[in-house]
């Protein structure tokens, strides 16, 4: 990773033959060190040197996949500890845990909840992505459970949480095609567990009673030749778990020790003591700090709405604010009688507002000027969403040609712009909308009712 | 290789700010390390959790939240006493929505009287929040700070437009603590602290409100701003950013759809009370691991959960 040009140079044949396309070996090595060129471009590197280099230039945190098809999820591959340094790349996923100790109704209830909580937020599907199966000793019940969930119509990835390699193997037969993660390698059983997963190169979850033991076990697994790992950072207490989560990520990325260069799994359910709100608190903590898979007991909207929203925020690209194109967006099939609504080009705002307009079923022309990709108040405070720019855009967009309605509804948060816009747009009638988009459906329905009534009376 | 903990030593430290008096007084800040990073060093004072009350009946809150306080919410003093004995909070945030010029426009004198009565009736530390109208707040804080002289309260917030007035009255004349508010940007946060200290308010009297949003509503900016502020305070020993952070989570949750949309609008989402609590809890937990030394919440259950979380993490 942090290999310097000089270190790479030492491994080249130092022939300066230019076959790589660079004038000297050193020039070539500088490019390789910066990541701009692949070291294989030099045809004269010895195999030994190449092996050394690929070891040293391999990412500090491994990227691996769990699941198959629509439910294939990628974990790890992070390069920074803080999101402002560079984008976080592979978002954490939430798993709901089942167990062979549960009765039919309990299993059915969880499946139903997982099916119910499935929605779109800002263009992204939000749902629990993983079902985890915990084995507590009843093999037959366990295998039936895996079968049942597999056949219930949920599209999810699986975790077989089972320290008994023989049982894990049988369970794996059922869901092999779904490329599940197998969880439960310990210092005592890791050899058998590797045998279960290695044929399909499945992700293997490693657990231990302390960070030291986790480290030693991971080393032993490395020595046995397996490197598709996910590390359980869950400790006895919340504090220990937080420490483990931070330490594992930091040892990998800052201390550059690949022994811990793996995604993590956190059993928030185990730490929450049947308190759903504590589960929300812990899941939030580990979404912010270094959890890759977060296991919870069950899902409902109260849990999902904040957790998926938080995750969506934490994993957006800080270098690239999400924007939508400034233009006229027709919503609910507007016509020449439909009013004009105005908002900003910040993707979050657009998706929330357009969603609520759709819910109202009232046809409108939604006009979005260039507001720098900011929220309503941010854009206004930054001088990018004012009376002038809105009026200008209304003219340029030629919305006047698609509707004869001269009502323009502005966000309630920028009510102060009313006068300005009216001054700049003679003939238009500025209506102050609601402060929150949530109130738009009622607002638009009332608006439409009034309009229709006026028309009928006219 | 042998296992070795990764330890990060920093030179910087967050200042320690005391609020309130007597047994119930609280201290914010004092840590040398990122939130709850006890493996790196001293985590300072345990973060504090506040409960929000208003000087008027909370008409704008969701029904179940009104219901919870309906016996007491018409009388601010009773409300304060009630939350003192029932919410489990470490401090009370009294927000003067009634002073809003676009609302009841109560006079600063009237508000000061209410604040004084509240301070006399409870022993929890007080945080005073204004209307968001900067001119009005300057006058409001001056009067309230005067009336609360000796109670060691926090006036939240001084902003660029009114920091001179707020700093001079709350921070200097009446010996209160001053909240330096900025909008989700490390440089703006720094600038507010610098302006206040240049005015003569001591660094140890300032608590920052670096801005907040509900999770899902631009929270990524809040998270990164907190990370950057804390890394600068510790790593670069930047004195102008070593103030504790207070985050009024409840102010943001109270209007987002995920929390408050009525069941009629979102039939599958379930009870708004539960959703609101979950949004408070998630946002508060995120802020606390981001760097907040105090958060302000509304529901006793959110407060209980977050207090448990904090106790488990320190
Ligand atoms: C994240 C954030 C930022 C991010 C930008 C994020 C972005 N892409 O917009 C950053 C950090 C870059 C930023 C910068 C600034 N910010 Co800023 N920021 C925020 C924050 C925390 C959240 C904004 C957000 O995402 N809201 C969510 C979106 C969905 O809300 P919205 O667009 O308003 O949409 C809602 C409603 O308006 C309504 N709606 C929208 N459109 C329509 C249309 C119709 C017809 C209707 C009826 C309704 C409707 O529906 C939506 C949901 O209800 C807020 C504080 C807060 N908690 O709200 C401050 C805030 C908006 N920022 C503020 C300020 C001052 C700034 C800066 C000017 C600071 C500065 N001096 O540099 C800069 C400006 C940018 C610049 N110069 O570069 C102030 C604005 C103060 C004011 N009242 O004018 C705020 C309120 C913070 C504060 N309390 O001081 N900010
Ligand atoms: S091809 Fe290899 S040996 Fe030849 S100049 Fe490039 S780096 Fe040096």
Image: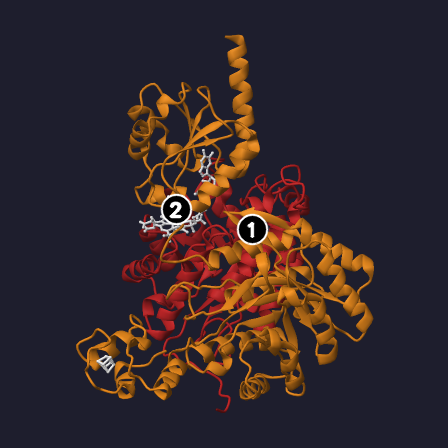
Chain colours: A orange, B red
**Disc with the residue nearer the chain's start (2 vs 1):** 1
Give residue A125's mark.
1
Q: Quadrant of the C terminus of chain B?
A: bottom right
Please indicate, yes or no, whether residue A164 appears anywhere in the rendered image: no
Comparing labels 2 and 1, the label whose residue is closer to the camera: 1
User: Which residue is the extreme one toward the top?
Assistant: A458
Question: Gap in Å between the C-alphas at discs 2 and 1?
Answer: 18 Å
The answer to whether residue A101 is left or right of residue B290 is right
A260 horizontally vs B261: left or right: left
Q: Disc 2 on helix, strand or loop? A: loop
Query: Is A386 positioned to the left or the right of B70 in the image?
Result: left
Vertically, is B240 above or below A229?
above
Query: On the image, numbered disc 2 is attached to which residue?
Result: A323
Give the mark count.
2
Determine if residue A334 is in view.
yes
Pointer 2 with pointer 1, Cβ within 8 A: no
Q: Position of residue A63 (x, y in %)?
A: 49, 71
Which residue is at the front of the view, A156 or B7? A156
């Amino acid at each position: 990773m942090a290999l310097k040009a000089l270190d790479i140079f030492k491994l080249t044949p130092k022939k300066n033959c230019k076959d790589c396309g660079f004038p000297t070996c050193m020039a070539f090595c500088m490019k390789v060190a910066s990541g701009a060129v692949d070291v294989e471009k030099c045809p004269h590197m010895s195999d030994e040197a190449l092996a050394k280099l690929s070891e040293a230039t391999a990412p500090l945190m491994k990227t691996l996949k769990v699941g198959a098809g629509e439910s294939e999820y990628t974990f790890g591959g992070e390069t920074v500890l803080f999101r402002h340094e560079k984008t976080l790349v592979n978002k954490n996923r939430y798993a709901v845990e089942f167990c062979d100790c549960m009765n039919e109704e309990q299993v059915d209830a969880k499946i139903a909840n997982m099916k119910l909580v499935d929605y779109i937020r800002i263009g992204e599907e939000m749902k629990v992505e993983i079902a985890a199966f915990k084995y507590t000793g009843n093999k037959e019940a366990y295998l039936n459970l895996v079968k049942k969930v597999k056949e219930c119509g949920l599209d999810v990835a699986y975790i077989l949480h089972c320290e008994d390699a023989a049982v894990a193997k049988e369970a794996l037969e059922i869901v092999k095609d779904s490329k599940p993660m197998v969880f439960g390698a310990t210092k005592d059983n890791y050899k058998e567990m590797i045998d279960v997963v290695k044929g399909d190169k499945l992700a293997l979850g490693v657990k231990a009673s302390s960070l030291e033991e986790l480290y030693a076990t991971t080393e032993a697994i490395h020595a046995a030749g397996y490197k598709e790992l996910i590390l359980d950072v869950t400790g006895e207490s919340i504090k220990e778990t937080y420490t483990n989560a931070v330490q594992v990520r930091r040892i990998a990325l800052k201390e550059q020790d690949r022994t811990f260069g793996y995604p993590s799994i956190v059993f928030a359910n185990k730490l929450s003591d049947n308190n759903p709100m504590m589960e929300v608190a812990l899941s939030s903590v580990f979404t912010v700090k270094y959890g890759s898979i977060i296991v919870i007991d069950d899902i409902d909207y109260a849990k999902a709405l904040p957790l998926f929203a938080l995750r969506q925020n934490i994993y957006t690209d800080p270098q690239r604010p999400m924007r939508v194109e400034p233009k006229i967006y027709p919503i609910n099939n507007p016509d020449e009688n439909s009013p004009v609504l105005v908002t900003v080009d910040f993707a979050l705002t657009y998706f929330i507002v357009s969603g609520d307009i759709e819910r109202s079923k009232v046809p409108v022309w939604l006009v979005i000027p260039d507001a720098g990709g900011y929220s309503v108040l941010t854009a206004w405070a930054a001088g990018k969403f004012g009376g002038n720019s809105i009026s200008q855009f209304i003219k340029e967009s030629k919305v006047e040609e698609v509707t004869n309605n001269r009502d323009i509804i502005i966000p309630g948060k920028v009510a102060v712009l009313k006068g300005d816009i009216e001054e700049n747009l003679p003939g238009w009638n500025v209506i102050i909308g609601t402060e929150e988009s949530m109130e738009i459906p009622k607002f638009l329905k009332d608006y439409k009712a009034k309009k229709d009534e006026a028309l009928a009376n006219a | 290789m042998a296992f070795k903990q990764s330890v990060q030593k920093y030179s910087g430290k967050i200042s320690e700010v005391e609020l309130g008096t007597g047994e119930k007084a609280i201290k914010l800040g004092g840590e040398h390390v990122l939130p709850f990073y006890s493996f790196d060093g001293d985590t300072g004072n345990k973060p504090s959790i506040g409960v929000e009350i208003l000087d008027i009946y909370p008409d704008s809150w969701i029904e179940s939240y009104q219901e919870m306080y309906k016996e007491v919410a018409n009388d601010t003093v009773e409300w304060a006493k009630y939350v003192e004995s029932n919410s489990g909070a470490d401090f009370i945030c009294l927000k003067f929505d009634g002073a809003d010029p676009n609302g009841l426009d109560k006079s600063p004198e009237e508000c000061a009287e209410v604040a004084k009565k509240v301070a006399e009736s409870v022993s929890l530390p007080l945080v005073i929040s204004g209307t968001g109208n900067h001119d009005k707040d300057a006058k409001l804080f001056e009067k309230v700070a005067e009336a609360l002289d000796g109670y060691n309260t926090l006036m939240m917030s001084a902003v660029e437009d009114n920091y001179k007035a707020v700093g001079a009255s709350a921070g200097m004349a009446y010996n209160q603590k001053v909240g330096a508010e900025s909008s989700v940007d490390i440089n703006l946060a720094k600038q507010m602290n610098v302006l206040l200290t240049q005015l003569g308010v001591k660094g140890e009297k300032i608590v920052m409100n670096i801005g907040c949003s509900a999770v899902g509503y631009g929270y990524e900016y809040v998270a990164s701003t907190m990370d950057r502020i804390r890394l600068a305070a510790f790593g670069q020993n930047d004195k102008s950013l070593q103030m504790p952070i207070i985050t009024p989570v409840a102010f943001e949750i109270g209007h987002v759809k995920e929390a408050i949309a009525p069941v009629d609008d979102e039939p599958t989402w379930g009870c708004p009370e539960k959703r609101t609590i979950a949004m408070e809890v998630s946002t508060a937990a995120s802020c606390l691991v981001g760097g907040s030394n105090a958060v302000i919440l509304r529901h006793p259950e959110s407060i209980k959960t977050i207090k448990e979380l904090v106790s488990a993490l320190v």
